[in-house]
Structures are given as structure tokens and as C-alpha cells.
Amino acid sequence: MEFFVEEGKRVHEECSTLILPALSIGNVGQLAVDLLVSSTAGAERVGYLDDPYLLPCVGNDAYGPLPCGDLALPLEVYESSSTATTLAQQRSPVAKGMMIKFAENIAEYAASSGKKDVIVLSSLDFQRLHNLDMSRGPQVYYLSNTESDGRDDHCERLGFGRMREYDSEGRCWKYLSSVFEKNSKEELTLPSEDELEDVDYYPSLPFAALFSAFKARGLKVTCLLCYCSEGDNIPDAFLLAEAASKLMGLTPDKFLGEGGKWRIPYSWKSMYGAPPDMSMF
């Protein structure tokens, strides 16, 4: 993975927290990063990452209201020096079977660029949620490497629910650890698709590979997750973006929307097409 700095821009060494999405159902992580980039004071694109395992794509600028000629690329890097935050927006999927390599590369980038904390935003299939508590409203779940069981006291104080399905001794979680930890003496193999069980669902997702890769690099990593289904996942994106801002302790003055609120990305205006013609009802 190679990092290219945009002409006339510079990298801020004080931006020690990296936030990035892990692609999953509903693209909630990407939408949440869109919100953070669009709304965080001082956030500007400083460059982009080029990785051989990321599928190519190109599009119009996602945030500006005017066609200024800027192109959106597969993996862009934004920085906000006022919040000491680096935001990486991934716009295309990883090539099939290459998630381990991609996670290894981006963990190397994070470690070599001086990142200390990493926040991964992603989503989980709602059909996998077995204990639904409607009285609490939408719930954010987390997974942290602070403790061996995934627990983090700060996340608990914020009201996030620990992802209890995490088992560091589970066969797939142990496989991920053995892959990324260079000194591991265990030679484990990943079960074939026919051998996968329900407990293997979570470690098979992109966020799990990223979590294990950052952990192996000695970085503090927290995954923020929500359950959702395919469809209009804008409310879920707000949920994860707000959770990330709480985790970082950002105050309303750090956001560009009116009254310290979120500023909707310009590209969202056409996300689901034009509204229906109400005359037909």
C-alpha cells in the first residue's frame, strides 16, 4: 500500500486517531465516514492510498456542491488537525479472497504514519441479532483490544454494548491472530465455506480482519458496530457517526452544521433517487 500526498497539502503528525469503515451490509460504515468528513471542522483531503487488493473506481467529488473537477478515488485520506483525526474513506470493495492482505497493508500504513488509536465503523446482519431490547432504541455495539474479552471501560460508560459473540479462543479468531502476529508459532487454517458454523460469522467479516491486523501492530483499536438490513441506512449512519464522536469526546463546536450538528454530504441528495410523484397517491 502506497500513500500519495496531494499537491500543496501536508500531513499533520498530530492526527493520531484513524477512523475508517469496514465494508459490510448496508454500507453503514462508509456512510458514517461520509458524515464525519462532511461535518468535522477542518477536515480536508490530504491524499489517497493505493493498494493492489482494492478494486478500482472513480467518481465525482462527494462533498462539494459545485463541479470543481475533483475526483473521488477508492481510498481517500482526510485530516482534521483541530480534532487530531485522520479519516480514511473506502469507496470500493476489496478483491475476493484478499481481505487479509488488505488489512495487513492498511495496518502497516497506520503504524508507520504514527497512529495511536484506530476506530473501525461497520455493520452486522440484523438477522443475526438474537437478543433484541426495543426499550433501549438503536444500540451501538463495540469490540476493543483493551481487554482480552473485548471489553473497554470507556465504551461501557458511554452506553455501548460489548459484542459478546467475540471469543479470542474461537477457531476463526485464533486463525486471524496467527496470520497477523509475526511471532506466532501456531499454524492454523481457516475452515472451508462448507465447514463454517454460525459462530464463524463474525470473524469472517472485514471488520474482524482489520481488528486483528491493528491489534497485532500494537495499536489501540475499537470497532463500533450496529445491526441493520439492506435499504435506507441513513439513520444507522448517524448512529455510528455519533458514537464515534462520543468515543473521541468531540464537542458540538467541532462540527460544521448549524448549531453544532451534522452537515449532510452533498452526494446524499441523489442516494436513493428522486422522491416519488405524490400525485399518483
Image (cartoon, rainbow, N blue to C red):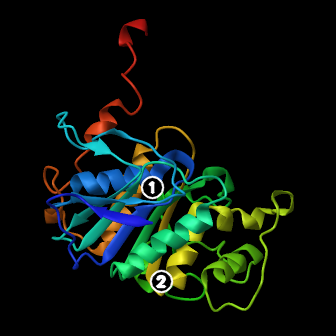
Q: Residue at x 77, y 70 (%)?
A: 190
Q: Amino acid at mark 2?
A: Asp
Q: Which mark is residue 152?
A: 2
- In the picture, measured across the screen, residue 205 lies left or right of residue 272, that is right
Corner quadrant of residue 227:
bottom right
Q: Position of residue 69 (x, y in %)?
A: 21, 37
- In the picture, measured across the screen, residue 85 lies left or right of residue 221, that is left
Measured along the vertical axis of the image, is residue 120 above or below residue 36? Answer: below
Measured along the vertical axis of the image, is residue 269 above or below residue 249? Answer: above
Tell me the element at label 2.
loop
Q: Nearer the viewer, residue 186 or 275?
A: 186
Q: Residue at x 33, y 45 (%)?
A: 72
Q: Nearer the viewer, mark 2 or mark 1?
A: 1
Q: Position of residue 189 (x, y in %)?
A: 79, 74
Q: Residue at x 56, y 41 (%)?
A: 230
The quadrant of the rendering that contains the C terminus is top left
- Which residue is denoted by mark 1 in the rendering? 29
- In the picture, measured across the screen, residue 205 lies left or right of residue 247, that is right
- In the picture, measured across the screen, residue 58 lies left or right of residue 216, that is left
Q: Nearer the viewer, residue 176 or 183?
A: 183
Q: Earlier in the sequence, mark 2 or mark 1?
A: 1
Per the model, the C-alpha gap separating discs 2 and 1 is: 21 Å
Q: Residue at x 23, y 42 (%)?
A: 70
Q: Position of residue 237 (x, y in %)?
A: 40, 51
How many other residues sit within 10 Å of disc 1, few (<14), some (14-19) or many (≥20)? many
Q: Amino acid at mark 1?
A: Gly
Corner quadrant of residue 130:
bottom right
